[in-house]
Image: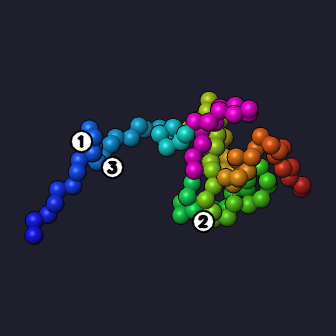
Amino acid sequence: MPRRNRPRRPGGASGGDEPRPLGAASWARHETGQDGDWLVRTVSGSQTVKTYRCPGCDHEIAPGTPHVVAWPADEYGSAADRRHWHSGCWNGRHHRRPARRRW
């Protein structure tokens, strides 16, 4: 039996064939909030292998936990400014103050 041709996508591009822009902003979305402009990336659980500390609740983000990485939009590309947040803490950051560490 002959193979059926698959329908083509508009513009002739297939899913993964489109060129992606280079740089840190290519995989991050821009968000504007009360606290300024941010570049935000959602990280799936399968991509995480390290433990991070969420600045919103001061709890650990364990390896394998989906979360958000955010950094100021004017400083994108600077690894020193990136912070890993629980998704809920990032979404609720305007409704409460960041947790304070007790040393």
**Which residue of the protein is positioned furthest toward the bottom in this rendering?**
1
Please tell me whether mark 3 or mark 2 is closer to you in this view.
Answer: 3
Residue 85 shown left or right of residue 19 in the figure? right
> Which quadrant holds residue 10?
top left
Q: Secondary structure at mark 2?
A: loop
Residue identified by numbered label 3: 15
**Label 1 packing within 10 angstroms: few (<14), some (14-19), many (20+):** few
Residues shaded magenta: 30-42
Residue identified by numbered label 1: 12
In this view of the protein, which residue sits in the foreground, 12 or 73? Answer: 12
x and y, in percent, of residue 6 in the image: 21, 55
How many angstroms separate mark 1 from mark 2 (CA)?
A: 37 Å
The amino acid pointed to by label 1 is Gly
How many angstroms separate mark 3 from mark 1 (CA)?
A: 10 Å
x and y, in percent, of residue 58 in the image: 79, 55
How many angstroms separate mark 3 from mark 2 (CA)?
A: 27 Å
Q: Is residue 42 visible?
A: yes
In this view of the protein, which residue sits in the foreground, 73 or 8? Answer: 8
**Label 3 packing within 10 angstroms: few (<14), some (14-19), many (20+):** few
Please tell me whether mark 1 or mark 2 is closer to you in this view.
Answer: 1
Sequence-earlier tag: 3 or 2: 3
| Quarter of the image with the N terminus in it | bottom left
The amino acid pointed to by label 2 is Gly
The amino acid pointed to by label 3 is Gly
> Which quadrant holds residue 102?
bottom right
At 74% from the left and 32% from the top, the residue drawn is 34
Residue identified by numbered label 2: 64
| Quarter of the image with the C terminus in it | bottom right
At 70% from the left and 47% from the top, the residue drawn is 90
